[in-house]
Image (spheres, rainbow, N blue to C red):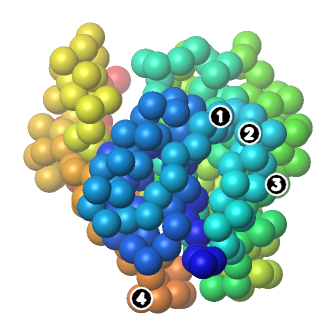
Amino acid sequence: MKKDVVILTGAGQIGMAIARRVGFGKKIVIGDKSLTNAQTISKIMNDAGFDTVPVEMDLSSRESILNLIAEAQKYGEIAMLINAAGVSPSQAPIEAILKVDLYGTAVLLEEVGKVIKEGGVGVTISSQSGFRMPALTPEQDELLATTPTEELLELEMLRPENIRDTLHAYQMAKRCNEKRVMAESVKWGERGARLNDIAPGIIVTPLAVDEFNGPRGDFYKNMFAKCPAGRPGTADEVANVAELLMEPAGAFITGSTFLIDGGATASYYYGPLKPQE
């Protein structure tokens, strides 16, 4: 029997939390670069009554993305996209961050947008980091939003020699995600579908716990200690917002980015997290 299909990319806590809110009664195709990770999340969800299948998928490869979409279409029409895949500044070099987080996300939004069913919806996970860098020019923003995907990494501002470090690469990638969602939402709208972005702050996941206990641990602990919420967030708090965006209650919301960071960005600009001159 054919079902509506949810594509979940990134077999982690945030993606799973969102899928558990919106994936009941649907086929959930879980794509991750690590098939083992995809299988782990798939088993957890299947054991909880969901219908999932794990697939190996490399977000940096258009061919791999197209293979994932083709696999998903075997089960029915694609009704939802949850993109929670990516690498962090401490996980990968500059080139990999740009290829996965920036280029790969752009390709995924583009290709799913070509096949998403009428009434379908997508959400992609960016980061508060996109809000931590100086504003780009309107011309630069438009380039990030509308440059053909295969030409994105050729942009002057994205050449590795113009990227300071992995954090800068990550910030640029996440800024691009937000602009890309705006531009792609217009195309998705032509199919009667919606697309939005969520920019989380520090969310407690196994990866974040590793970061808390690693060389940058004090930096992260200081960030959430000095934000208005006074704590890190949970994957379910991100899923709360995703559920709104992906359900009929959010039917008038598309092309938007929702910052969920406990006020850390507000504190960065106007509070105790503001960098000292």
Precedes in sequence: disc 4 or disc 3: 3
Kind of residue at disc 4? Ala
Position of the C terminus, as image quadrant, is top left
Q: Left or right: 70 with respect to 15?
A: right
Task: Tell me the tag on residue 58.
Answer: 1
Element carrying mark 3: helix
Which residue is label 3 attached to? 146
Which residue is label 2 attached to? 64
Kind of residue at disc 3? Thr
- What crowding class fits label 4: few (fewer than 14 Cα within 10 Å), some (14-19), or many (20 or more)? few
Which residue is label 4 attached to? 249
Q: Residue at x 34, y 70 (%)?
A: 21
Q: Are marks 1 and 2 in contact (CB under 8 Å)?
A: yes
- What crowding class fits label 2: few (fewer than 14 Cα within 10 Å), some (14-19), or many (20 or more)? some
Q: Residue at x 60, y 26 (%)?
A: 97
Q: Residue at x 57, y 32 (%)?
A: 33
Give the image location of residue 189, x and y in percent: 73, 80
